[in-house]
Amino acid sequence: MEEIEVDVAIIGSGTAGLNAMGRVRHARKSFVLINGGEAGTTCARVGCMPSKVIIQVAEDFHRRTVFSRCGIEGGDSLRVNLPKVMEYVQDIRDTFVDRVLSHSTDHLSGAEFIQEYAHFIEPTQLQIGNDKRVRAKAVVIATGSTPIVPEAWRAFGDRVLTTDEFFEQETLPQSMAVIGLGVIGLELGQAIRRLGVEVTGIDLAETIGGLSDPAVAKQALDIMSKEFPIWLGAAAELSETDDGRIRVRAGDNEVVVDKVLAAMGRRPNLDHLNIEALGVPLDDKGVPLHDEHTGQVGELPVFIAGDVNGHRPILHEAGDEGKIAGHNAAHYPEITAFRRKQWIGITFCDPNIITVGKRFEQLDEATTAIGEMPVAPVGRALIMAKNRGLIRLYADKISGRFLGAEMIAPAGEHLAHLLVWALENQMTVGAMLRMPFYHPVMEEAVQAALNSLYAKVEHKNDGPLTELAPL
């Protein structure tokens, strides 16, 4: 049995694990990075990046539907070659994966990077395969997550896909049911519909895209329902037809499809870890209880980061959590608590669905002012033939401090950053309105929503908005 001793053992070489490794290296501590399964981040392999490739292709192809009104002829003759689309998606995906590997694990020695599964024997001792044991002064758990598939659905084999399999497809089927209309379901459902697949969207929830603002949620449902049928409020049930297709029932609705995309969320990758050996309480998902500002599990020299903890399963959050966990593991027993950044969520459907800061369901109605702006009359949106959506902004009614937003809007990915930066800087609505706004841009829709909001807050110490600040 080979015995390995290091300062820090990191389990998982995804975004969180690689960022943890960076902090450990910076502290000049010895480490081993252990990874079971494929190397490369979830984002690059099966998440953020390949999904944006197929979304872009679908949006480019869909643009032909407005050509005729602009005087551009010949759009009806355009065709999409699905095998070539999927080949292109995979080529770009492989480029992103190669970049991740070439900037990270490709440069590690065999002693630093071990590609096998590990499990805990005790909090600071790990078993790797059958012939290695690692003893570390601290351990970082960064094993990521896996798409959820109900056990009964596994009998359908490759006719039920998750993102783990979707981007390996050589072509797309004629019809699909997309079950789960959060980020993944909406993005891929709309993209494949625009590429010619007959899509039916299904979700147990009463809203789509994780929206909680009823006005924005209604707009989102109205807009997306024009792309493909959407059934809400009932669980999906699958059965096999006589010809080997899949019958999907949800409430009183039924459809027969070639394949199903399961997009019902992800579960933490804890199966191989023997997490019970830590001897700490677990939450209802089996995740060890921990502090999100330090990453520390109980009082142990064990830290957890990234999708495995289930807090904020987004790349930039996983990166931040990896840095927090890596720093504290490298400096244990000295522990530092870090302030987390403000929330920003982007669904890259068209229009984008956005949540920033506090969501509607987190607000106190009695102390909150709400401003809004429909996208329909916005000049820039009309020019782009994308004038659909609604922007809703929230502020403290007394102080005028900006609190958050929910929206569905074109260029929402950029508007979201504008707003979350204002939130990080604790700006008031008045201070935000004093910022420059160009014309004609989508940001003018935010300006209009801010004006609507400013009229409803009581604190007006920002001064008259019609005047420039004196030198």
Image: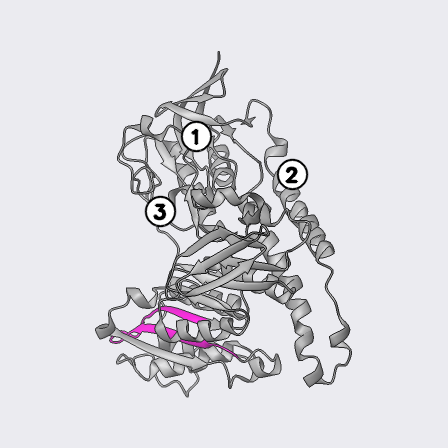
Residue 9 location (% of width, % of height): 45, 28
* Mark 2 and mark 3: Cα distance apart in space: 30 Å
Judge whether 134 appears above or below 408 on screen.
above
Q: Callout 3: helix, strand or loop?
A: loop
Please name the residue that numbered disc 3 is placed on.
338
Name the residue type under label 1. Answer: His
Residue at screen point 45% across, 72% down: 220
Q: Is residue 330 visible?
A: no
**Element carrying mark 1:** loop
Furthest residue in direction left, as rendered: 366
* Identity of the residue furthest to the bottom in this view: 466
The residue that mark 1 highlights is 272
Q: Position of residue 403 (x, y in %)?
A: 33, 68
> Which tag, 1 or 2, sits closer to the chain's start?
2
- Tell me what residue is drawn at x 33 percent, y 41 percent: 336
The amino acid type, in three-letter code, at marker 2 is: Ser
- Mark 3 in CB contact with mark 1 (< 8 angstroms): no
